Amino acid sequence: MGASPVSARYCARVHRATLKEVAKEAGVHPATASRALNASTRSMVNTATAERVLRVAKELGYTPNPIARSLKTARSSSVGVVLPDLTNPIFPPIVRGIEDVLRDVGYSTWIVNTDNDPERESSGVDSFRQRSIEGFVFATARLSHPLIEEMADASMPLVLVNRRVSRIDIPSVTADDATGVSLAMNHLYELGHRQIAHIAGPQELSTGLFRKRAFRQCLEDLGLPHEPERIAACETWSEDAGDRALTTLLDKGVPFTAVVAGNDLIALGCYDAMKRRGLRCPEDISVVGFNDTPFMDKVSPAMTTVRIPQYEIGAEAARLLMEMLQDPARHPRSLLLPPTLIVRDSTGTVHAGPHATRR
Amino acid sequence: MGASPVSARYCARVHRATLKEVAKEAGVHPATASRALNASTRSMVNTATAERVLRVAKELGYTPNPIARSLKTARSSSVGVVLPDLTNPIFPPIVRGIEDVLRDVGYSTWIVNTDNDPERESSGVDSFRQRSIEGFVFATARLSHPLIEEMADASMPLVLVNRRVSRIDIPSVTADDATGVSLAMNHLYELGHRQIAHIAGPQELSTGLFRKRAFRQCLEDLGLPHEPERIAACETWSEDAGDRALTTLLDKGVPFTAVVAGNDLIALGCYDAMKRRGLRCPEDISVVGFNDTPFMDKVSPAMTTVRIPQYEIGAEAARLLMEMLQDPARHPRSLLLPPTLIVRDSTGTVHAGPHATRR
DNA sequence: GTGAAAGCGCTAACAA
DNA sequence: TTGTTAGCGCTTTCAC
């Protein structure tokens, strides 16, 4: 042992062993060493020889140079994740899910933030491709999304997370918004609400549009009349937009006793609008959010919200992508993951059952 | 134009032009083309030739293959970021700061999550090194941190963010905790508080230890007696730990009218402990947090907290690292960035001035 | 079962 | 100023 265990462990070693050195030390040709070191080609080589190579490789602390391998194979054992903005709290758990699954299968994860700028999205994808990325996870999908559609047409392995595009043949892993909305609506219905409003998210995103559609469907399922004036759509997923939208409804005198908000930020905006009017939540109007954003148990009143399995969405997307890489011919598959209703009362406690304010 | 503008733009092109092709098309040797294409060697080549090469490269949509370049140069134009956990809300803004600065100078950012497991940290660093990463940003530093110290000793370019190690010669970009604590303490002092407790964070982390030291120093500066029993340290940055620590102080009957918490989660734990005892905040006990975690304006009561310039910490760390790469001989430098006190009253409004509850 | 040879795409000596 | 040559470390034909 030349290097001390510590410096070996902490990789202070300046020189990294190469395949050629392993081969020389083991008394074989580099090609043979390569075959022995790669599980898929190990059977081509004599068992004893293979063992010797493996042993030498371990002694020398050999690790293959992924750059050289990539250059030769035009593959990289890595995938690219395209996000709008990592500081949006819905994305980190998704990224962790992706990363944890990929690490287990020896893949690395690249992240790029686009701030929803198509230019940056394009250049991010380009820089991934230059690096021989093997597949993509997109969290930036709009319903109409030329870049993603072109990439899919060019048979580039990709999976959408959280949001979908209109075209049904593009694989995606999302929460089942229909179920989520119906959990929220049934909860409100059971509390006695019959006039329910929906403050929807941006309609060019699947999450915004699908939740709105599900809202209409739920009205029908519950036998409630569909009053278009009880629906408003926000331009952005923001507190401000939610505040403005609910204020508009209140200004118009639209009658309702509960709100299903497109997400938690919009729901917080509803809180703001109500507070300004002196309306209490949930006594005057109940509000249900979407996503179970961190600290929603701490806001006032503690928010009842539909929890999305974000980590699992990321993990499943990574698994789906790995499947696609292994079997490119396989038919594209999409996953809908079940959300959960998190019911909270004024003390922030989580309940499985119905909410406090019956009508 | 063989490819349509759209497919060129959206990179549906299957074949990517190589340097050899550009050279051939421009009627020069690949080496010349390489010189023309690289800004630093362009002066070696005839201006007219260089222009021709550049034009051809543009026509062919040539982009250099970073893999091949890395293999040749043993550099990668990328840096690695080592984090405990991306889902901790303090890290995404730091990462964005790093990424935004690096993108502007043509560098990419790799992220690895370690969950504070030294094994994963080690293997993450190794995988970075295999990829010829040029520098590291560490957000996982403990005061005693053999891996980081060894790497620094081996002259590997690295910068610590948010936390520091004991050894002063290792470059870091952190918030100025002494100033942060003194902002909090002076605020409380001006409100009339004279018996102030500190629920500190983990003492093996610089953020935990330095804030505690600053707390003691502030007592002295304000001419207040130092009562050791008014200080408790949490094992983790968690609501639970904060709850337990404050409960212990209350159980002991330690007298205090205000708390400086090690961070916002610990402060939330203090809220919990007080609520259980029927103590009101801020009427009975005032609490100040640290970090200005998202949604702390929405908790009840809205949290007064020391805001850390997280994005700027990341951005400055990236700039520092780039400086170090350009001039490895330069003396290591560390930055302390100024925090801001965010004073909130019960309506969630932000104030520059003193808090509502005077004594 | 193993070795020889070629080459992925690029850059950097060295030579002209 | 430009071309030649070599090689980064690896995988993968093709012979033997």
Image (tube, coloured by chain):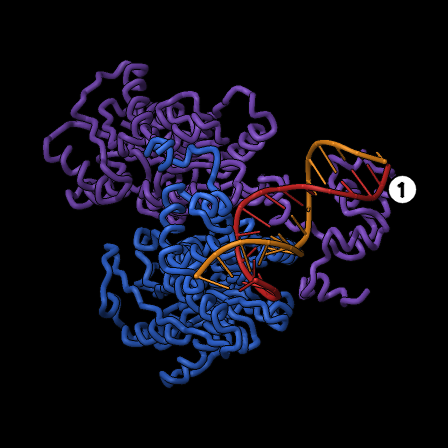
Chain colours: A blue, B purple, C orange, D red
Tell me, yes or no, if residue A232 can be seen here: no
**Res. A221 image quadrant:** bottom left
In the current view of this chain or complex, which residue is farthest to the right? B48
In which quadrant of the rendered view does residue B147 lie? top left
> Is residue B289 rendered to the left or right of residue A88?
left
Residue situated furthest left in the rendering: B252
Relative depth, front residue between B204 and B278: B204
Q: Tell how many labels.
A: 1
Return the x and y of residue B152 as percentages of the image width and height: 44, 28
In the image, residue B333 lies at what x, y percent? 50, 22
- Indicate the position of residue A139 as horizontal and vertical percent values: 51, 61
Q: State the residue at coordinates (31%, 43%).
A: B117
Residue located at (46% from left, 37% from top): B310
Residue in the foreground of this view, choosing between B148 and C14? C14
Residue located beneath label 1 in the image: B48
The answer to whether residue B107 is above or below residue A145 is: above
Q: In which quarter of the image is the C terminus of chain A?
A: bottom left
Which secondary structure, mark 1? helix
At a point 34% along the width and 64% down the height, the residue shown is: A284
Q: Mark 1 lies on which chain?
A: B
